[in-house]
Amino acid sequence: MVEVPNLQLHKGQRLLVSPTYADDEIASARLAEVMLHFSQERLLPAVRWIPTLNGQLGDVAVKFFPEGVLIPRTEVVQYLLEQPKPIAVASMSARGLFARWTPSMTDPAARQELENGIYVARRTLDAILLELGLGEESRLVLQAGGQRHVFPVRIFRRCILDYQIFVAWTIKPLSATAVADARLFLVRADGTSDSDNPTTLPP
């Protein structure tokens, strides 16, 4: 039996997934969405009201460029699942705006840069796992957006291979806890994070 990892959905978020998506694919897309949301938490929202969703862009919906497609926040996971992999997603200048690209959309130099980024992420993860004595089923915990997410290493591996998201990350051992084996620690482009100490968890 495949255990569905404990990756929390945002309030009101729904997942209308096809039966063709495996549990790990869904969990990977959920984790990618959490990381994207984390990357923009300190940004000001884009100044645009979405009448159909009765809310501000960045709060109730996000927009992906270059197409400029508007996706309700409740359907971002579904959108990510439907994209060809690998895909790179970068935060733009305001909350709710993202740029996305895939190897088929880019010139050879940019394609090579994307592939190199995935290679470096994989090698970095392998080195950290070896150093900490962790395996694919070891549990990681991520504290982000006021929520705690627990998932196996294999989900994080799939996430960084399928989705290149522009946040820095590392994995740190935790002090004695039954929550997880280690902590996934994220850092935004401006150097901010959700904690000053990646080896402990808030209560």
Image (cartoon, grey):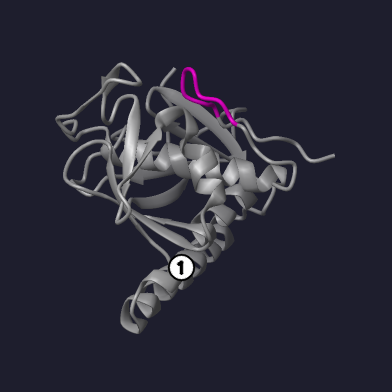
Q: Nearer the viewer, residue 51 or 109?
A: 51
Q: Amino acid at mark 1?
A: Ile
**Image quadrant for the C terminus?**
top left
Q: Position of residue 4 (x, y in %)?
A: 70, 35
Which residue appears farthest toward the right when viewing the image?
1
Figure quadrant of residue 46 = top left
Give the magenta-colored segment's residue range: 8-15
Which residue appears farthest toward the bottom when viewing the image?
108
Q: Nearer the viewer, residue 135 or 60?
A: 60
Q: Is residue 111 above or below residue 10?
A: below
- Residue in the picture at 28% in, 35% down: 196
- Quickly name the residue at label 1: 118
Left or right? Give the position of 102 relative to 15: left
Q: Position of residue 14 (x, y in %)?
A: 56, 25
- Residue in the picture at 37% in, 27% down: 145
**Majority secondary structure of magenta residues:** loop
Left or right? Give the position of 162 relative to 110: right
- Disc 1 packing (10 Å; few <14; some 14–19; many ≥20): some
Q: Position of residue 50 (x, y in %)?
A: 27, 25
- Residue in the picture at 62% in, 28% down: 178
Q: Is residue 186 above or below residue 128?
A: above
- Residue in the picture at 41% in, 31% down: 72
Q: Is residue 63 above or below residue 145?
A: below
Residue 139 in view here:
no
Q: Is residue 11 magenta?
A: yes
